[in-house]
Amino acid sequence: METSLSLFAINLAAAAAFMTVGWVISLVRRNVTIADSFWGPGFVLIAWLTFFNTHGFIWRKIILTTLVTLWGLRLFLHLHGRNAGKGEDPRYAAWRKKHGENFWIISLFKVFLIQALFQWLISLGVQYGQIFAVPAQLTGFDLAGIFIWTTGFMIESVADRQLSNFTKKPENKGRILDSGLWRYSRHPNYFGESLMWWGIFGIVLSVPWGIWTIVSPLVITYTLLKLTGVSMMEETEFGDNPEYQAYVSKTSAFIPWFPKT
């Protein structure tokens, strides 16, 4: 138990240090949006630190670390490419305006270190699942978790690609994407991301007392729904858009479902 607590503490410190680097870069660039690019790689860092500092069942370690790495790097490439050359994200710009000249230090805690904490909390399953050497074989939970994760990864990847292709066309400026996966959910990319972490949880159910790591998918789902995802984006970017309000009236916010007629 003491070794496990040390591992968790080291990973939390590493995540905090990593996000602090991002904060320093944001000060130089005067753009907090860099935090988005640091989000996915922070999970990758925690996963690999755990991999090299645990002695669990090797194939479960490989699976957990590989899945997190694939997700984290894909998300980094997507967000970095989307934000490159653009101004500060409206969500962060609103905070900068609210806090004024003190935002430079407030952003360290309100944006970067809080993200480090959430990276660590959401990664609890990835960390815990690599500790145990038993069961020393893949179980039904492992296979079900991989399937759920793969489904979520595909949904998020396709949704991001559809949105990227849509926004690149000048004629779509100011319009709302309501086709493809976006016909069935206003935020299919967030739903896919949540589903991936429920898949990770499924894998961790294979190890002793893995049930407690349900905190990980619950935290990411709540975050996407109520904190930095659905609610914040709809308030800051689409709150006064009549077309979006019509879209809201017929389209599920999160879980994909058939639109209302």
Image (cartoon, rainbow, N blue to C red):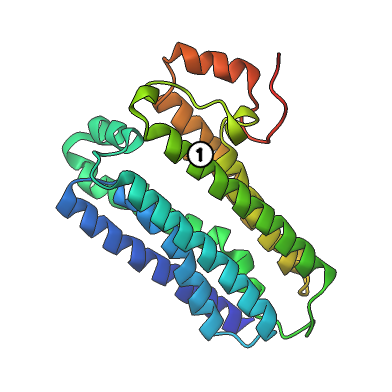
Q: Position of residue 40 (x, y in %)?
A: 45, 59
96 and 163: which is toward the camera: 163
Single out the residue that lies furthest toward the right: 140
For image coordinates 63% across by 55% down, the residue present is 196
Q: Position of residue 110 (x, y in %)?
A: 36, 46
- Is residue 45 shown above or below 249? below
Q: Position of residue 48 (x, y in %)?
A: 50, 76
Instruction: Quadrant for the N terminus, please.
Output: bottom right
Q: Is residue 109 visible?
A: no
Single out the residue that lies furthest toward the bottom: 55
- Is residue 216 shown above or below 102? below
Q: SS of the residue at dot 1?
A: helix
Judge from the rendering whether residue 141 lies leftward or rightward of residue 19; answer left or right.
Answer: right
Q: Position of residue 63 (x, y in %)?
A: 64, 74
For image coordinates 55% across by 41% down, the residue present is 159
For image coordinates 58% across by 19% down, the residue present is 248
Q: Quadrant of residue 191?
A: top right
Q: Is residue 45 visible?
A: yes
Mark 1 belongs to which amino acid?
Answer: Gln
Judge from the rendering whether residue 37 lies leftward or rightward of residue 84; answer left or right.
Answer: right
Q: Quadrant of residue 238?
A: top left
- Is residue 215 shown above or below 51? above
Judge from the rendering whether residue 128 lies leftward or rightward of residue 82; answer left or right.
Answer: right
Q: Quadrant of residue 215?
A: bottom right
Q: Which residue is mark 1?
A: 162
- The count of marks equals 1
Mark 1 is surrounded, within 10 Å at the Cα level, by few (under 14), some (14 to 19) or many (20 or more) other residues, namely some
